[in-house]
Image: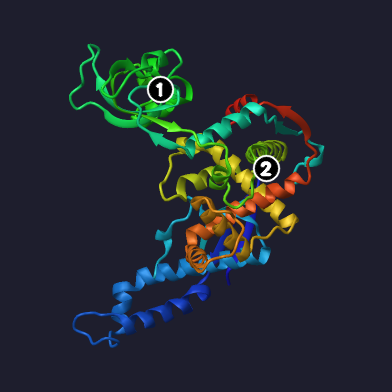
Amino acid sequence: MATVTRENIGLLNDKITVKVAGEDYLPSFEKALKTYSKTANIPGFRKGMVPAGLIRKMHGQSVFTDEVLRSVEKQLNDYMTTEQLEIFAQPLPMPENDARQLDLNNPAEYAFAFEIGLKPNFSITDLSKGKFIGYKVDITEEMIDEEVSRLQLRHGKMTDPETVTSDDNVLNITFKEADEAGNAVEGGITKDNSLLVKYFSEAFRPQLMGIAAGATFTTTIANAFEGKEQEWVLGDLGLTAADAGKNFILEVTKVGLVERSELNEEFFKQVYPAIEINSADEFRAQVKAEIEQHWAAQTRNQLHDQIFHALVDDTQIDFPETFLKRWMQFNQEQPKTAEQAEAEFPAFKNQLKWTLIVDQIVKDNKIEVGPEDIKAFAKQQLFGYMGMPTSGDDQPWIEDYVNRMLKDRKFVEDSFHRIQTEKVFGWAETQVKPKEEKISTDAFTKLVQEHKH
């Protein structure tokens, strides 16, 4: 008769030993042999007519081993189900196990041991007692002016002046990698791009005034660009910040200028086709509302970051670290060394902690993600990709797209986790009492960069 015993071997770390006797595995072994003899395809014998003795001689030991191990696995799973054990991953066979002890000719009682990591009981930190800041970005008239100007350029008409006259001119430029003497490097980087004059550094721009197509400059990326524009140009050339000192020949192939759209009803309709706007003041009010909406989303994300840290940093959870490190080594598609597992464990533990916290919040607050949530998420993504308003009548092709996406298992799984996480943070927002603090866009952007994960 099979027996299962359990003993503690460490923090949240138990050893389960399963012992099986002949009566537990021999009946299934004999049955497996008979089944095998009916299906075996052995030269010289008709299918289903292979003598049992021959099957036992040829395959008996492997079938015997399989049935013993299957019996052990069943006893282990039945025990964990009966005991309602909450464990991490799967039980790990212990080093003392040795399948070579199994002998078809001498059936006996066999013992196999497994190590399990138990999930901890814990209490989530009380968010209502935490200190949080609800940032409110100050929307200035200058920000509105810049956005109105950007929209006028975006919807403006491209013209072809002979020379550069302002920072708003567009230059089609061919970048050619050069050596220190200013000669083009054979086989070097060559790339075409279109850039506004104002993307160049302030010190470099005067050289561009009055030039026409055909003009060339030999310079470094660091000399011609700075800040985010330098990063963008380097990225477009397939380079990094370390390459900013490289020489390039910049050949202007075309000079353009976008004539800004006038602030009239035609322009208002182009920018906001679904909204009736009759004056420049109404247009500016709508632009301001959209800027506010953008920064409200950014500040909400930053509040979520504060909540995440409060939950992870202030919730105390114990882990069966020895077990988890062993599991990282032996239960992965790509096995790890003990040193690799040790090095990667802090990040793994942090992610595992967050997963447990989310699961607990979901369970305690009965947070659910249903098919309609995923369907709405798919529509939202589609509308976002196509720049469509999220309201309005659904067209048949939209329904077809959504139904197609709902058949994509990876999309459904990814969407489920994203929606669930959003609902968890939505619940968390109801628990916190953030102190409102006004902040400039520059200060807020710097704050976010400093706390990026």
64 versus 296 height, above or below: below
Secondary element at tag 1: helix
Rendered location of residue 27, percent (x, y): 48, 79
365 versus 241 height, above or below: below
Residue 278: which numbered mark, if any? Answer: none
The residue at 65%/59% (across/down) is 85
The residue at 41%/67% (across/down) is 65
Q: Nearer the viewer, residue 92 or 310?
A: 310
165 versus 3 height, above or below: above
The residue at 55%/64% (across/down) is 19
Residue 318: which numbered mark, if any? Answer: 2
Asked whether the residues under the numbered discs 2 and 1 touch, taking CB atoms below 8 Å apart as contact, a structural biologist would say no
Q: Quadrant of residue 373?
A: bottom right
The residue at 57%/40% (across/down) is 264
Secondary element at tag 2: loop
Which residue is identified by label 1?
241
What scheme was used to colour the molecule?
Answer: rainbow
Visible in this render: residue 56? yes
